[in-house]
Amino acid sequence: MSDTSLYALVYSSDAIGSITEGALQEILEQARRRNERLDVTGILLYREGRFVQYLEGSHDNVLAVYDDIAVDARHTDVRVLLQQPVLARRFSSWTMGYEALRDAPSALPEGCRNTFAEIERADDPARVLRALSELTLWFHVRAMRA
């Protein structure tokens, strides 16, 4: 695959210890600087000690960013959930969008799904993509309201 191919990668991981808003802000600032330099865009989601991140850009640059992330000591159990070529960017104007999600309710109302948890269904790439599309739409709508 050439360096110019548009590529996406989604991973999840577990935070080490308690992550404060200040620590999250530091992670975002570092990511935004690196991603701007490498022309990588995406979104970082955080809830209940769990990260889910979507990265997009050239194949080589996305993998370079992921390689750095995978060895970051602030999290563990890093799992690639999806990686594939894509036709267009989902987050073209965000070097790293961010949303701290509120804690999930203990029981969801009938007919509702936990989209955040659905993303982590690495055994079913179609489910991962559907859940990611839903979160993408949700994040874009929230950003437009802000």
Image (cartoon, rainbow, N blue to C red):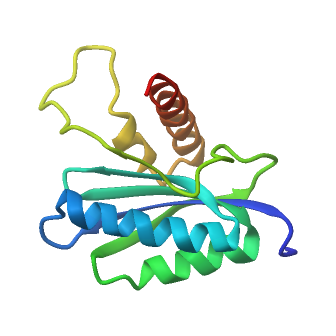
Q: Quadrant of residue 37?
A: bottom right
Q: Residue at x 28, y 40 (%)?
A: 101
Q: Quadrant of the C terminus?
A: top left
- Residue 87 pos. (x, y %): 82, 47
- Position of residue 62 measured from the top left corner of the image (x, y, whole percent): 65, 70
Percent x, y of residue 93:
65, 47
Where, by quadrant of the figure, is residue 64 drawn? bottom right
* 47 w.r.t. 9: above or below: above
Q: Residue at x 40, y 55 (%)?
A: 52
In this picture, is 82 found above or below 68? Answer: above
Q: Nearer the viewer, residue 143 or 17?
A: 143
Q: Position of residue 112 (x, y in %)?
A: 33, 20
Q: Nearer the viewer, residue 92 or 108?
A: 92
Of residues 77 and 28, the one drawn nearer to the viewer in this rendering: 28
Q: Residue at x 54, y 75 (%)?
A: 66
Quarter containing the N terminus: bottom right
Q: In terms of depth relative to the viewer, which is nearer, 36 or 78?
A: 36
Q: Is residue 10 left or right of residue 116?
A: right
Residue 79 relative to residue 94: left or right: left
